[in-house]
Amino acid sequence: MTTPHPTAGDLTHLVKAYDVRGVVPDQLDERIAEAVGAAFVRITGATAITVGWDMRPSSPALSAAFSRGAASQGADVVQIGLASTDQLYFASGHLDLPGAMFTASHNPAKYNGIKMCRAAAAPVGQDTGLSEIRELAARELAEPGTIAPAATQGTVTQQDLLTAYADHLRTLVDITGNRRLKVVVDAGNGMGGHTVPVVFDGLPLDVVPMYFELDGSFPNHEANPLDPKNIVDLQKKVVEVGADLGLAFDGDADRCFVVDERGEPVPPSSVTALVAVRELAKHPGASIIHNLITSQSVPEIVREHGGVPVRTRVGHSFIKQMMAETGAVFGGEHSAHYYFADFWKADTGMLAAMHVLAALGEQPGPLSELVAQYTRYAASGEINSEVADQAGRAAAVRAAYEGKPGIGIDDLDGMTIAGDGWWFNLRPSNTEPLLRLNVEARTPEEVAAIRDAVLAIVRA
């Protein structure tokens, strides 16, 4: 029995807030990829685009179909081949072309997706063209020929930009004169295994590689370092080999997680604060973006170093948009996405990793001591609860706190409730029937008490 093609209406579920993502081939197939490619060119008005893909088995065929759709509209396609997502953003900036990256990031092997951007890695989200791309592609799928082919077809060519990408990163952060460091890198069988050897080549680093073999079936663990179980191997290896630190990349290597010399995870908020301080040293008084789930220590440290903290919603399109509006030099998210003005305002886990390596190598102490100054509060991490009625459970939590003395509530992204020295955010997932809870307070005991009180309501 063959799987039926998704109907045009299915694009509503396939197209998320800032990318396309679904199960292959049940929700995303070559027919859909080709329609989206044609719609992408029509909506952006591009005469040429660049396309990259990750190591998932379905990525080459889907990216080829997207390229066909783009070329049918007269756009020339520059395929950069296997790439990390930030390598695709580099290509978009370097070539000054709109781009499309085929990846489902940290999702399991059966998924794939498309992250799209305009020239210079400018975001394409629901409010910046993605909804129009979805609508036009849906019409093409319902009535083939809706997007008429151009009189002259575009060309499809290949260009290897991996070395140029590595060279660019190394001009932004120079660690060549630093002390030698031993670093364990867990690529999770994702694209870090493709980029790390080239970026780190010749630097004062002794690299201990883990799971560098590109394998979209993820045989060792999910390529999602946000889940603590997926960095256990890295933590053990760092201690076992006496490394100075460990780095873990997600599937498309646009996020990087850091482990200190004791095997302890370094909170992404601490990395955000560390990099912010380094960027403020180069750009005094600049703005630094942080999403509303980032630790309160980030805006505190930014202010202490003369910067201007800017709070935003969760999601890369929101952060990129805010960076453009404010002229911010750097932005960080709780999920270990890090955005740099000198990388076309795009997110790159590799550049964040190089900042950590530079900061550590410039001084003699261990990483745990270095990041201690950036870690001021206890946090729960993100806790997901599957609920049938997201709005109803969130309303019940609001009712439990609203009107109490000293309690503030804001609705920038989900609901953030704050008291004296603590806050929590409860927000619905864009893609699943989940409520996501993040709690921060002065002590682990306070975090546990607030977490348990909120979860009791959410899961009632």
Image: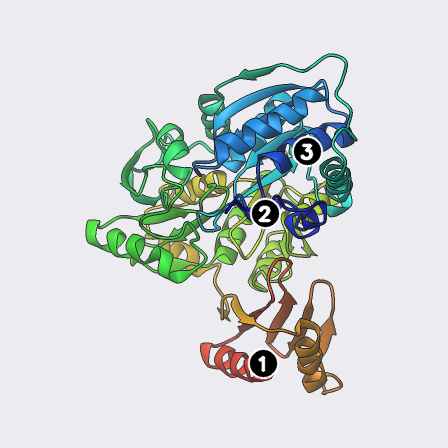
Q: Quadrant of the C terminus?
A: bottom right
Q: Residue at x 59, y 39 (%)?
A: 114
Q: Secondary structure at mark 2?
A: loop
Residue that label 1 marks: 454
Front residue of 382 and 282:
382
Front residue of 176 and 56:
56
Depth check, mark 2 against mark 1: the one in front is 2
Query: First in sequence: mark 3 or mark 1?
Result: 3
Front residue of 353 and 90:
90
**CA–CA distance between discs 2 and 3?**
14 Å
Q: Position of residue 162 (x, y in %)?
A: 46, 25
| Residue 27 disc label | 2
Q: Position of residue 5 (x, y in %)?
A: 61, 43
- Among the 4 quarters of the image, the one containing residue 313: bottom right
Q: Residue furthest top?
A: 152
**CA–CA distance between discs 3 and 1?**
44 Å
Q: Residue at x 22, y 50 (%)?
A: 242
Q: Position of residue 167 (x, y in %)?
A: 46, 24
| Residue 35 disc label | 3
**CA–CA distance between discs 2 and 1?**
35 Å
Is residue 95 placed above or below 267 in the rendered structure? above
Q: As drawn, is 445 to the left or to the right of 29?
A: left
